[in-house]
Image (cartoon, grey):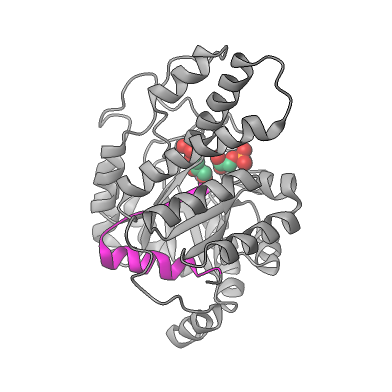
Amino acid sequence: MPLVSMRQLLDEAAAGGYGVGAFNVNNMEQIQAVMDAASDTRSPVIIQASRGARSYTNDRFLIHLMWAATEVYPEVPVALHLDHGNEPDTCFSAIEQGFTSVMMDGSLLADGKTPSDFEYNVRVTRQVVERAHAAGVTVEGELGTLGGIEDGHGSGEVHLTDPDQAVEFVERTGIDALAVAIGTSHGAYKFTKPPDGEVLAMNLIEEIHSKLPDTHLVMHGSSSVPKELVDEINRYGGEIAPTWGVPVEEIQLGIRHGVRKINVDTDARLAMTGAIRKVFAGDKGEFDPRKYLAPARDAMKAVYVERMTQFGQAGHAGDYEPLTLEELRERYAAAV
Ligand code: G3H
Ligand code: 13P
Ligand code: ZN
């Protein structure tokens, strides 16, 4: 199966009432773990690469790994998505490289840190939509800003998404999917206690979905930061301070109200780190990377299998025939 369009994956998820995990990757083991989990659970899936991942892998390695993934796992519908494109050129280069979906995050200026104004966001996002749709490529935009700056991305200022502004944003940009800010943040340190309605504004999702029933909503910063994964790291010499993530039940509530794409990176990072620390703690003389990368891959796969099951995408891989980007291009052209 070739790489498929994210638009189609999300349309199908909306029709089926489930969510699709979008998992960040930076290396072969992560891609293998996601694909293996998707194959075992018969899940359609989104693999996403940040700007950092693209420079770490040099796009060419990443794209070839993705092609290998589609060859080895022909039964898995998979979209390749650019996470947090900081300016139109970043999105355009991803499209040229073969990504089937891009995020233009115009909620921040091109430095990826300074909150932008609404008109700037509309302008850069619309620019990307025009070029992307002409190539059959899906576009995700973002309105509002997440908290947190620990991964070097974000302003640290939280601006929750305004539902009325979201309607105007979608109308003026023509995006396929909208990332909403509802109080989550990237990284492991999201909340200092289990989040309640005061810090996690799930009601906003409901309101935005009722105003924009045909726009796929995206939750960023959606790692759950399971205590077992943090404990495993700390058991073997790590020092992760007590922290809470987004409870899976809240994500499931979001899925019932229009969330179709759920971004998860941190949980896999935690799983990988714990597994590697365990090997190192057990055999201090170990120096064959395969001996710690294989358990790391297994640990990540277990996280992906769990999330694919919880988000509801499991079992839906064979539901539909993937459209080509050319078919998507024609569909976008007909809709204008
Ligand atoms: O945007 C946040 C993702 O977790 C990607 O993080 O920029 O460190 O690759 P990164
Ligand atoms: P987490 O840090 O919660 O995994 O969020 C990842 C994300 O939103 C990537 O865009
Ligand atoms: Zn994000």
Q: x, y percentage for residue 76?
A: 47, 63
- Answer above or below: position of 246 versus 262: above
Q: How many marks?
A: 0
Q: x, y percentage for residue 153?
A: 60, 38
- In depth, the one of 288 and 246 nearer the eye is 288
Residue located 53% across and 54% down the image: 47
Q: x, y percentage for residue 243?
A: 42, 20
Residue located 41% across and 53% down the image: 40
- In depth, the one of 94 and 272 nearer the eye is 272
Q: x, y percentage for residue 188?
A: 49, 27
Question: Is residue 1 shown left or right of residue 95?
Answer: left
- In depth, the one of 60 and 69 nearer the eye is 69
The answer to whether residue 146 is visible is no
- Answer above or below: position of 192 versus 175: above
- Answer above or below: position of 178 versus 308: below
* The magenta segment: 3-23
Q: Is residue 35 magenta?
A: no
The answer to whether residue 43 is visible is yes
Residue 193 found in image quarter = top left
Dividing the image into four equal quarters, which quarter contains ligand 1?
A: top right
Residue 250 found in image quarter = top left
- In depth, the one of 165 and 108 nearer the eye is 108
Q: Is residue 9 magenta?
A: yes
Question: Is residue 103 shown left or right of residue 313?
Answer: right
- Answer above or below: position of 21 versus 266: below
